[in-house]
């Protein structure tokens, strides 16, 4: 008696929707088993982790705030992932975006005007894209793995940030804390919903998602990227440029991550500091895959992942869950998803049942 | 009458969407060469897998020397005395012949070497037991496979399309070997769709069509036309008559192209020269793996040369050696590659989206956005005009059978109305009806004034449709041979490199 995987003749659309949900259910079960083993009260954890983020407006608005950078970065990364250009350095591109955006309030703390925050966001995007130039260049030139180069660039970005914060950009009145001055009012992204911290960047993230949808589902350029990801030989056969696919993928991903970084310093942070990213660049990789690399799916997965961040904080306070629990949840969720997604292309068959119609 | 060696009654096997074998009856007598004849997809391979124990039947009975058997693995089939040589060889290239054989056959190396030599002498299967497999020709590798089977003393030897990889001269040696084997009491199941071969060597033939047996005949008593009719169920379409025409200007020219690939397992090309004019079909013959793939990529633009070598490939009078495939296509070039899945088409994408791959210039893209209506209309036209059997334009390319996908790809490329058309292996895995149709269309293009280049391993096909043939062997191209003044044997001599000294 054994179970076999048999390739489907066409991908199952039903499974494409069911697989992420099944993965989610499985991850919840596995993690709660872990919580029980650790001696936590599963009911309390369940409430704090998965329900509380949605029940009160104040915590849900925090979910929307967390969702913004995840959504921006994941939409950008997913484009590259579909072209099989695996940029895992969004974390570094995010940091560079934050640094570039901070240059205005740090160097011109007295400046005023409504142009400041849009320019900061733009600078942030450019900074993130610039940080992706080197990986793209080496990949196209020397076929150096973009996976390694982007990852190493993230480590460099973290050191660059640390240098600026303890060196030239340190707030002189900041009691030697490694952080810049607090930004002036005009350097902050306007609040969207009064009484919450949700700001205009959420609208930008939704617009960016719509753009990503059109680009990947409707445009010929997006089509070429997908072909490159699915069948590299077909790309060469048709004469699509592989180098251009690498450049586009990395620059788009870098721009999105940089924009997210800028929106973070010009939003909830209000200054540049070491902890500007709570691992958004890495979490967005999970978000992108969990959303099936599809712009609509990513809307949902980013919302869920943001809720997990908020719920994790809640559970830490109210149910005594350790800090690492959220990371464990994220990781196990990705593993479950990668296992479940196989069912979109394959179906399981038991011995002796190979030929049902 | 003695009991047959192998006897099948009512054998059936279904897969999810197809009934691959239906109610097959088959008797293989001792000491006979028995042909299984059928088009691609008729169920020949499935039947062999059932006999060889690779798969189990859903229903039916199998008797071996009168006793019921149900082999559940090739190992079991081998121990009963059934051996099989697959179309695609399973030899390790970095090992020697005797090392490959010792992986399956127990015994000391010295004893094995002696037995290999002995079998080689007995059956005309000469091969050096100590040679490395990567240094052997395809024909020699096939001999190794056959020897490996013979080492286990089989009573039945199954050969899956053994001649499809061989040049004509090697086919003759193979047949002599098979006759010797038969005379010593080994029965042979010979799978093929080549009618003349079957008529020349087999004493029984079982014909399969759509998974069912359509006849048991003595092939020597029927002509090829009869057999073909039984095989495809209707009359063979006649080849399109050739319109004689004077060749026009040169559209494609390679002048002494030298190419050293980066990959050591690829063939390097040496001083390759060819000229292709409008209104003619030039065929490149040769045993596979002699540089066809490398040559195809250089012509298609998938391999780009550096700028100094750009005039090694001339198209439409322009140097194009450093241009990519898209730039060459814009000049009026189209290409059908030998690999369909993953190169000529993207298996996970719909036929519609596969149209876009090369036909995007025909108004399928506007302002950078895909025009789904135009894409759908173009795809429907290809499906209808080229008789692609599929549920519709939204079917995934990977779900089509090889022959149907080939018809789609050929259709898509022909719809581009190229002035210079290049097809590699146009009818590989395509059934006879569709293959004839593809050849007719190639001749139509030629008659309409296009320049057509065809790479094929099937000499008969090239003789059917080409004006001229050049033979590729070990990365070198023979001089041009005019088909009307050339015999198949001459091409065959170039294929095995025996032309030196003969001239």
Image (tube, rainbow, N blue to C red):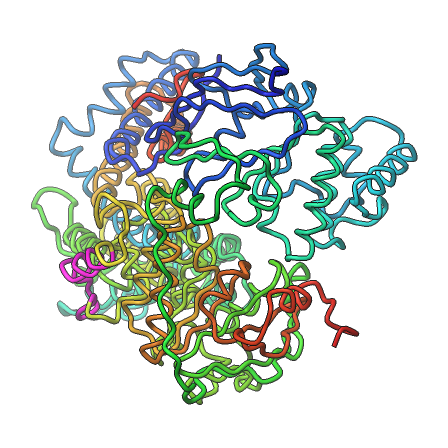
x and y percent of residue B269 in the render?
64, 72
Q: Position of residue B250 (x, y in %)?
A: 45, 87
**Does residue A339 appear in the picture of this structure?**
yes
Q: Is residue B375 magenta?
A: yes
User: Depth check: B190 or A17 in front?
Assistant: B190
In this orientation, which residue lies closer to the viewer: B148 or A45?
B148
Give whichever of A295, B26 is nearer the camera.
B26
Q: Say which residue appears at 31% left-offset and 48% top-offset.
A: A74
Looking at the image, residue A211 lies above or below residue B259: above
Q: Is residue B317 magenta?
A: no
Residue at the spot 26% in from the left edge and 45% down from the top edge: B390
Residue A112 versus residue B315 in the image, above or below: above
Image quadrant in which you'd find residue B384: bottom left
Looking at the image, residue A183 sits to the left or right of residue A167; the answer is left
Residue A177 x/y as whole percent = 40, 51
Query: Residue visible at 64% across and 63% down?
Result: B290
Magenta extent? B364-382
Residue furthest to the left = A194
Judged left or right of residue B335, residue A50 is left
């Amino acid at each position: 008696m054994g179970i076999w995987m048999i390739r489907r003749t066409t991908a199952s659309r039903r499974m494409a929707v069911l697989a992420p949900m099944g993965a989610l259910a499985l991850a919840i079960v596995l993690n709660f088993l872990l919580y029980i083993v650790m001696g936590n009260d599963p009911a309390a954890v369940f409430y704090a982790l998965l329900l509380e983020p949605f029940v009160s407006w104040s915590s849900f608005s925090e979910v929307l705030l967390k969702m913004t950078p995840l959504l921006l970065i994941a939409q950008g990364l997913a484009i590259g992932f579909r072209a099989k250009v695996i940029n895992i350095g969004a974390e570094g591109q995010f940091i560079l975006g934050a640094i570039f955006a901070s240059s205005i309030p740090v160097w011109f703390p007295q400046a005023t005007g409504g142009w400041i925050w849009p320019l900061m966001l733009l600078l942030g995007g450019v900074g993130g894209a610039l940080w992706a130039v080197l990986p793209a260049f080496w990949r196209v030139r020397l076929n150096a793995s973009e996976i390694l180069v982007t990852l190493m660039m993230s480590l460099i970005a973290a050191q660059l940030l640390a240098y600026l914060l303890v060196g030239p950009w340190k707030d002189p009145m900041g009691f030697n804390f490694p952080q810049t001055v607090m930004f002036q009012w005009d350097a902050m992204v306007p609040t969207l919903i009064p009484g919450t911290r949700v700001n205009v960047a959420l609208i930008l993230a939704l617009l960016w998602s719509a753009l990503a949808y059109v680009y990947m589902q409707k445009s010929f350029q997006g089509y070429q990227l997908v072909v490159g990801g699915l069948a590299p030989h077909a790309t060469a056969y048709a004469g699509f440029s592989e180098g251009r696919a690498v450049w586009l993928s990395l620059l788009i991903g870098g721009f999105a991550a940089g924009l997210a970084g800028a929106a973070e310093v010009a939003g909830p942070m209000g200054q540049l500091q070491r902890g500007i990213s709570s691992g958004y660049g890495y979490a967005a990789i999970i978000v992108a895959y969990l959303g099936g690399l599809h712009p609509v799916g990513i809307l949902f997965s980013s919302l869920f992942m943001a809720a997990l961040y908020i719920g994790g904080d809640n559970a830490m306070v109210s149910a005594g869950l350790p800090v690492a629990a959220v990371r464990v949840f994220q990781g196990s969720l990705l593993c479950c998803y990668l296992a479940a997604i196989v069912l979109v292309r394959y179906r399981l068959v038991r011995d002796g049942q190979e030929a049902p119609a | 009458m003695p009991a047959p060696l192998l006897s099948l009654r009512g054998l059936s096997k279904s897969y999810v969407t197809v009934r691959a074998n239906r109610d097959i009856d088959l008797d293989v007598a001792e000491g006979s060469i028995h042909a299984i004849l059928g088009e691609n997809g008729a169920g020949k391979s499935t039947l062999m897998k059932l006999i060889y124990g690779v798969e189990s039947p859903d229903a039916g009975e199998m008797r071996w020397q009168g006793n019921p058997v149900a082999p559940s693995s090739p190992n079991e089939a081998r121990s009963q005395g059934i051996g099989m040589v697959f179309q695609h060889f399973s030899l390790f290239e970095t090992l020697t012949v005797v090392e490959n054989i010792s992986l399956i056959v127990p015994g000391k190396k010295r004893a094995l070497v002696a037995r290999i030599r002995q079998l080689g002498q007995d059956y005309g299967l000469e091969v050096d037991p100590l040679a490395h497999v990567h240094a052997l020709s395809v024909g020699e590798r096939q001999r190794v496979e056959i020897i490996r089977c013979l080492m286990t003393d089989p009573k039945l030897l199954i050969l899956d399309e053994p001649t499809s990889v061989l040049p004509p001269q090697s086919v003759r040696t193979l047949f002599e070997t098979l006759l010797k084997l038969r005379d010593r009491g080994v029965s042979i199941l010979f799978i093929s769709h080549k009618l003349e071969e079957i008529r020349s060597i087999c004493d029984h033939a079982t014909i399969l069509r759509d998974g069912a047996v359509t006849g048991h005949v003595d092939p020597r008593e029927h002509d090829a036309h009869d057999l073909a009719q039984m095989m495809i169920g209707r009359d063979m379409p006649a080849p399109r008559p050739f319109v004689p025409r004077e060749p026009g200007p040169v559209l494609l020219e390679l002048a002494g192209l030298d190419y050293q690939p980066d990959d050591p397992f690829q063939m390097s090309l040496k001083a390759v020269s060819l000229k292709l004019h409008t209104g003619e079909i030039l065929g490149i013959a040769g045993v596979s793996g002699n540089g066809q793939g490398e040559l195809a990529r250089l012509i298609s633009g998938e391999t780009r040369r550096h700028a100094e070598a750009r005039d090694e490939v001339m198209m439409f009078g322009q140097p194009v050696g450093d241009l990519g495939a898209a730039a060459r296509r814009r000049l009026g070039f189209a290409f059908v590659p030998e690999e369909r899945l993953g190169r000529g088409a993207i298996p996970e994408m719909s036929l519609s989206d596969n149209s876009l791959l090369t036909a995007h210039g025909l108004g399928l893209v506007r302002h950078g956005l895909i025009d789904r209506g135009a894409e759908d209309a173009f795809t429907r036209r290809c499906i209808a005009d080229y008789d692609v059997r599929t549920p519709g334009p939204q079917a995934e390319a990977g779900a089509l059978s090889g022959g149907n996908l080939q018809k789609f790809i050929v259709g898509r490329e022909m719809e581009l109305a190229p002035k210079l058309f290049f097809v590699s292996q146009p009818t590989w895995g395509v059934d006879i009806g569709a293959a004839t149709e593809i050849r007719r269309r190639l001749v139509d293009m030629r008659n309409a004034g296009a320049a057509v280049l065809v790479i094929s391993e099937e000499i008969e096909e090239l003789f059917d449709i080409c004006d001229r043939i050049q033979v590729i062997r070990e990365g070198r191209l023979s001089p041009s041979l005019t088909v009307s003044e050339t015999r198949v044997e001459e091409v065959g001599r170039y294929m095995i490199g025996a032309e030196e000294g003969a001239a």
